């Protein structure tokens, strides 16, 4: 290893926030360092795309503030040797979305420097995403509609859609969505790469060419996912939702199921970790802990997927010991697949007949639902229907309910995928099995899509297009394209034979009111406190002071966010607490003792290594937010973190958003906060 240090005798640097928010006024500082052995006459300039320069001033003593050449857009002054000069440029963010390209220059007659940085711009509002989906078979024309609220800024609105002639294209598009999901708990890590393995194997069996970047990058994705799962394994061999969570029967079973399929697909699995996980799964199955029937069935399903015949009699005994009349469709479906896996096909067919009798028909389509519904995966209608389809196909059933159920699943899409990573994965598992039994490979038609009576795209579709990479069509309001506030009309015209799957996403930003306290939604309240350090008892103790909206650069704040719900038994909760532009989170919280705060109190010699005191499963810092994850929701929850004001400006802080990860329609948000940060 060789280390080389390079330096410039004259250089310029910029201090910028991690992001800009629409409407904010914020200070960008340029600092010029003169390390030459003489003073230098220097021309200093600053330019920014998508920002309006309001004013500027020199923030270094001894320099005149009247040196700005408005016409040329630069300062021309002499900088003493071995000194630095700071100029503050106060800008306003005028556009709602995109990026600001910042350029700064320091020019002399002997040495010069220049710098360009790109900083993202985010809208002042809360993102809303609405889906528009339709399947066309025999009909020649279909009219759809989506709405952009009147108070939404069209410049931040976007409508995108994709048209595919087969389920194969639908599968590939959903895989791309899974690969781009922003969080990485155990379930999402598994749901990222496991469906990709299954889709790839399905395409291989059907001799379908792979034409998507996600599948091309699959080996790297699988290996990265496995390594992450290895690091998440608990000392007892099981897995929870996150590393610091309790071992969970479902999560342990899901990981074992995924590793088994990856192993059978030819991927190298850490056998020690895999064996330890199997042991934990068996230990949980034989323990005295209360396990609901659906989770128990999933655990047996995962064990049967290992293809280890030594468990066959145990799995058979457990399934036969269940009261089939009391099982929901999800559990029944899992048991059918497990019986097929251990070669008890006759019993599987018998149970398949009962599963068919549990279906619900509506509008020419079919689905399976749980006996009782309250935002849990065990009775999820989409997941129940997915595994019912998979179970009927695995058992050899030729029921005409299968294509009707597949059509119902397609209609439940939320854009290009389904409501969550978990839901998307289960649907893909079912569609892969169905793809092997159906013939959608010979389309022959031309389609046209109109938006508000304007032709957007027209294309001829033939058999050669079935497996091509699907390209999104994007109508971007920022570019002044054909979007309007209010109702937008879509017309799809199809001429020819074959299926057409249309999937669209309507995205915009709106300033919502504070959540109302009704139903299952969350009530969210956020408070800021300014921290002041004091010397007490030989230690630095911080006291909380009321926040009046005005801060100084360098101030440290305690953020407390309270979340309430009226519901019991909610699981897999996420709080995304948005950060102010120009602030940085303080990650080393162990150094802070805050008076009156139990989570920041003195622990004697353990001050630097406090005992585990948080109730949440995980906490993540991102550029624009701090995210918290809770496995089992309490009726009242309190979250806190520390931030530091750095860059002066007048800014708006977006609301904190609370929701269930797998059922995001259960949500809530706090109010907006306005902050004015002054220089020291």
Image (cartoon, rainbow, N blue to C red):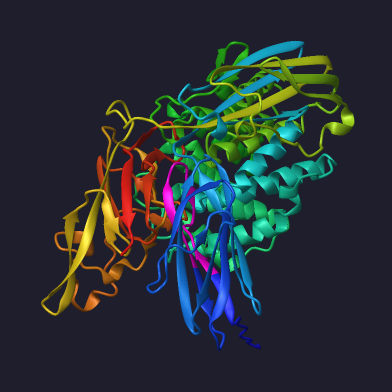
Residue 534 locus on image (x, y percent): 15, 71
Q: Quadrant of residue 344?
A: top right
Residue at point 32%, 50% (across, down): 676
Q: In what quadrant of the picture does the C terminus appear?
A: bottom left
Q: Which sits in the foreground, 284 or 4?
A: 4
Q: How many labels does the image show?
A: 0
Query: In the drawing, does residue 58 fall left or right of residue 226?
Result: left
Please identify the quadrant where the N terminus is shown: bottom right
Q: In the image, what residue occupies the spot 71% across and 22% down? A: 398
Magenta residues, dominant SS class: strand
User: Does any portion of residue 312 appear in the rendered image?
Assistant: no
Residue shown at 68% from the left, 30% from the top: 393
- Specify start and end residues of the magenta stretch as a single range: 13-30
Viewer-proximal residue among 396 and 141:
141
- Left or right: where 657 falls relative to 150: left
Against 106, is 282 above or below?
A: above
| Magenta-span inclusion, residue 402 | no
Residue 60: where, in percent of width, then height?
A: 40, 71
């Amino acid at each position: 290893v060789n280390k080389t240090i390079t330096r410039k005798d004259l250089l310029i640097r910029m201090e910028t926030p991690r992001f800009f928010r629409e409407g904010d006024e914020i200070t960008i500082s340029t600092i010029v360092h003169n390390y030459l052995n003489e003073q230098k006459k220097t021309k200093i300039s600053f330019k920014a795309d998508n920002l309006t320069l309001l004013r500027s001033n020199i923030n270094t003593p001894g320099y005149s503030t009247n040196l700005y050449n408005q016409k040329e857009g630069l300062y021309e002054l002499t900088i003493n040797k071995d000194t630095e000069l700071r100029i503050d440029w106060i800008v306003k963010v005028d556009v709602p979305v995109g990026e600001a390209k910042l350029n700064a220059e320091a020019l002399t007659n002997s040495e010069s420097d220049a710098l360009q940085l790109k900083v993202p711009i985010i809208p002042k509002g809360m993102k809303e995403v609405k889906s528009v989906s339709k399947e066309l078979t025999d009909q020649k024309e279909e009219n759809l509609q989506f709405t952009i609220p009147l108070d939404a800024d069209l410049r931040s609105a976007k409508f995108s859609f994709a048209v595919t002639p087969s389920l194969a294209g639908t599968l590939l598009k959903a895989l791309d969505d899974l690969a781009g999901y922003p969080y990485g708990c155990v379930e999402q890590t598994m749901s990222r790469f496991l469906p990709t393995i299954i889709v790839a194997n399905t395409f291989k069996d059907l001799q379908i060419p792979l034409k998507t970047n996600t599948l091309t990058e699959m080996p790297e994705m699988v290996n990265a996912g496995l390594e992450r799962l290895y690091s998440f394994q608990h000392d007892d061999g099981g897995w929870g939702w996150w590393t610091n969570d309790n071992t969970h029967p479902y999560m342990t079973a899901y990981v074992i199921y995924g590793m088994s399929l990856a192993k059978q697909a030819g991927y190298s699995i850490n056998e020690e970790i895999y064996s330890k996980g199997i042991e934990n799964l068996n230990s949980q199955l034989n323990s005295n802990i209360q396990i609901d029937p659906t989770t128990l069935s999933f655990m047996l399903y995962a064990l049967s997927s290992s293809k280890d015949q030594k468990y066959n009699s145990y799995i058979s005994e457990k399934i036969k010991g269940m009261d089939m009349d009391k099982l929901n469709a999800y559990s029944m479906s899992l048991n059918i697949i497990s019986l097929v896996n251990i070669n008890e096909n006759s019993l599987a067919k018998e149970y398949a007949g009962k599963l068919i009798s549990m279906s619900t028909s509506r509008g020419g389509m079919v689905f399976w639902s749980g006996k009782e519904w309250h935002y849990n995966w065990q009775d999820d209608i989409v997941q129940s229907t997915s595994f019912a389809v998979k179970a009927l196909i695995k058992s050899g059933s030729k029921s005409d309910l299968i294509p009707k159920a597949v059509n119902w699943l397609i209609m439940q899409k939320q854009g290009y995928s389904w409501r969550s990573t978990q839901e998307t994965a289960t649907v893909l598992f079912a569609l892969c099995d169905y793809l092997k039994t159906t013939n959608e490979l010979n389309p022959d038609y031309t389609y046209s899509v109109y938006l508000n009576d304007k032709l957007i795209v027209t294309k001829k579709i033939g058999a050669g297009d079935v497996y091509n990479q699907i390209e999104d069509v994007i109508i971007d309001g920022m570019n002044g394209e054909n979007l309007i506030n209010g109702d937008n009309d879509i017309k799809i015209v199809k001429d020819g034979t074959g299926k057409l799957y249309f999937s669209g996403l309507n995205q915009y930003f709106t300033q919502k009111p504070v959540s109302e306290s009704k139903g299952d939604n969350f009530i969210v309240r956020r408070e800021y406190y300014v921290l002041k350090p004091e010397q007490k008892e030989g230690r630095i103790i911080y006291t909380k002071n009321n926040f009046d909206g005005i801060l100084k650069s360098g101030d440290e704040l305690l953020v407390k966010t309270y979340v309430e719900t009226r519901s019991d038994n909610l699981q897999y909760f996420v709080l995304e607490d948005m950060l102010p532009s120009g602030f940085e989170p303080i990650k080393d919280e162990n150094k802070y003792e805050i008076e009156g705060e139990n989570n920041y109190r003195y622990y004697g010699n353990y001050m630097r290594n406090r005992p585990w005191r948080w109730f949440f499963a995980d906490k993540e810092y991102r550029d624009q937010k701090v995210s918290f994850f809770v496995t089992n929701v309490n009726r009242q929850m309190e979250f806190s973190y520390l931030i530091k004001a750095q860059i002066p400006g007048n800014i708006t802080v977006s609301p904190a958003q609370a929701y269930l990860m797998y059922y995001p329609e259960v949500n809530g948000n706090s109010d907006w906060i306005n902050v004015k940060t002054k220089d020291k």
